[in-house]
Structures are given as structure tokens and as C-alpha cells.
Image: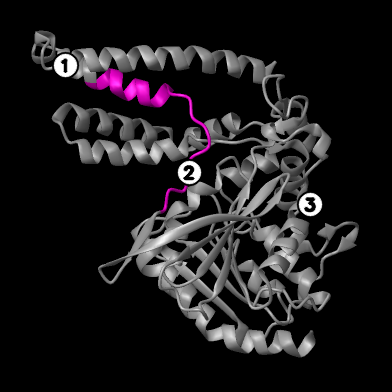
Amino acid sequence: MLYHAHELQRAWLSSASAMASIGAEMLGNPLLPMGYMGLGPAAASALEVFAHAAAPRGKPEFGIESVAISGKSHGVTESIVLTKPFGDLLRFTREGLPKNAPKLLIVAPMSGHYATLLRGTVERMIESCEVYITDWADARTVPTSEGSFDLDDYIDYLIEFLEFIGPGAHMMAVCQPSVPALAATALMNADKNPAAPVTLTMMGGPIDTRKSPTTVNDLAMERPIAWFRQTVIATVPMSYRGAGRRVYPGFLQLASFMSMNLGAHMQSHYEMFKHINAGNDASADATKDFYEEYRSVCDMTAEFYLQTVEEVFQKHSIPNGSFEHRGKVVDLGRITQTAILAVEGERDDISGIGQTKAALDLATGLKAGQKQYYLAEGAGHYGIFNGSRWRDKVAPVAEAFFAKHGASGKANLKAVS
């Protein structure tokens, strides 16, 4: 019933959005005197804000056609290089990229948003790397005939993607996938897999959520896993290809995110209204672009969501040493060939300070010189992978880390293969 109620609301809001958009255009028509009188301009601005907020959204495109480096534009090519039922592997290459440029696998979070949330991450790393990124599927579009998808499958996908890219690659996990990325790295090191990543960068990842717990962490601990199973899991309706699949709906995740900073979101929309009313289109469009991406959400499989909540946020299986993959305990001490960089944001309200850094202590098989920590001052959760702090502060640290460990990492991998 939950999903059906949402679909009914979405249909109503879609019609309301269309009507509001028409109303805004009519009031803004220079040939109509109402647009110049009294509350006409303000009403048009308010209708435009509502129309944008209520509009239905699908999967966004990356749309990266070029990047500017030292004032020169370089064309960018995007391609799908590997297709799987629950996610594809995309590759981005730019004109003029050196043949020996690092190969980087960016692991996008499967947490309610599409991989395009990392558009800024990809744009910046294209400057120096051949970039690959996981493009996870919206679970409601995957037929039940394709089976289930849980944390074990996620880890298997990462290993397969790294093997496809080949030896010498670097891996960068943003937020939630830090856990499966760390596990995949440990498994590949233990198996002496030549495709094990040379470096692993984890940014704002919930490795040990007992450290500096946030509101998100507290919520996971306050309720038993049965509550999550009974309250937030829904069945995909018949109108989608994944009809009958049990999922954690993206619209619930969006509502959760919005409620965490409701005041800030309301203020942003009020500022948008003022910009539109004042004719400041550039500022209004910037806010619209952000929310166009932010409101584009996708579903997660129920088994993946519930397993993540239980193992990562409730049992703390990674720091406790009890995390398993296919019934086998994952030993982080087996990581000896992959250097690790942990990045955290000073003002991160989703993954608190120390949660990602914990991985450095858990990787007991690495020497001190193979581990590095960076705290992005003044950065919130999104600031460590998007925006000016990411571009100017965090990305250069990652690039230097790649350069420092790339050659030696490749040599070590060859020695054990």
C-alpha cells in the first residue's frame, strides 16, 4: 500500500506541477498586464518554485561533454563497458589524456540517489585519470527473474569490475560503498588477485559508526531490524519492470534526507523564489540544478538495505571482525598490497569524524607509509566529493596519493601474480 499511495500522490503532483508551470508562464507573459501589477510577479515566482519542486523526475544523465584544463577545453567520451542486471560499469575518457594515466574506479553509493550525484567527482578526476564508475540500477526496474542483490553481490560486482579494468587500478569509494569496497580489497589481497586495487580511497564512509555517531547512526540503533523490515520495505507495483520485488523506496530515503535539514531546504527554496522574483536567473538555475539531482531517487533491494543496516550500523561487523562474505569472515589484516587513504569532512553530519579513519587501524597488514588520513576542514558530507573544497583541496590529495603508490603498487602486484 505504501508504494501505491506514493504513486497516487506522484500522479497528482505531476498534474499540479504542469498546471503551476502554465500559470507561471501566463503571469510572466509580457503581453498580459497582470504580470506587472500587484502580486502578479510574486505569484508567478511562487508557482515556478512549486512547479519545479513537484515535477516528476527520472534518471539524470551525466552530460559531461568536455572539461577545461588550464583554460583549454578537452572533449569527454562516456561509454558503457560492462552491463550487469543490477548495475553497469561506465567509462569516461578525455582527449589528450596520457596513455599511462591512472585508471580509477569510482564506486558510487547505492543509497537512494543515482551515480550522477557524483558528477562533480567524475568531472574533476577526468582531468588526470581514466575514470570508471559504478552505475547502479534502480531496483524497481530489475525484473524479479534476475534474482536478489545483497552486500555479497555488491562485493562480487566490485571484484568483477576491477578484474575487467585490469591490474594497476585505483578505487575510490564515496560514503556507503566504503564498506563493500574495503571488504572486496581484503578478499582480493587475500587471494593474491592481480587486479586488486593499487590504492583504496574511502571518503565519508561508515566503517565504524560507533565513533562520533550522527543522527543517521542513532536512528539505525534505536530500532530493531524487524522494525525496518516491517515499516520501510515496500513491494514494487505492477507498473514497473521490477513488479513484485521488495525494495527500500527511494522516496523514503529522500524524505529522510530532507527531514534531517528541513530548515535549510525551506530556506533554499525561499531564496530560489527571491532570485526568480528579482530576475536573477543564474542563481535560481543553480538551485534548480542542485534539486534536480537531489530529488532524482532510486530504489534499493530490500535485502541489500536491511543487510547494510544490520551489519554496518547495528552489529558493527567490520570493526568487530565478524563481517562475512559468502559465509567466510573477511580479514582486513590480509590487506598488504593496497595503500589506503581515508578522507573525512569536518562538518559531515552523515558519517562522523573517525568513522572512515577507523579503517586505517583495522588494516593491520599495511605499513605506516601505506596509510594516509585527510580531514577536509569546513567540508560537510557532500563537500568532500563535490564543490570547490573537493576540487581544490580533496582531489589533489587523492591524486598525489595515486602518484605516490601507483608504481610501487604495480610492482608488488606483479610480484604476487
Which residue is denoted by mark 2 in the rendering? 61
Residue type pointed to by label 2: Glu
N-terminal-most mark, 3 or 2: 2
Q: Is residue 161 left or right of residue 119?
A: right
Tell me what residue is drawn at x 47 percent, y 80 percent: 400
Q: Mark 1 — residue? A: 29
- CA gap between label 1 and label 3 equals 54 Å
Q: Residue at x 27, y 20 (%)?
A: 46
Range covered by the magenta-colored residues:
45-64
Q: Residue at x 70, y 15 (%)?
A: 1
Q: Residues within 10 Å of mark 3 (few under 14, many from 20)?
A: some
Name which of mark 1 and mark 3 comes first in the sequence.
Answer: 1
Q: On residue 153, which mark appears?
A: 3
Mark 2 or mark 1, which is nearer the start of the sequence? 1
Q: Position of residue 104 (x, y in %)?
A: 56, 68
3D distance between C-alphas at marks 1 and 2: 31 Å
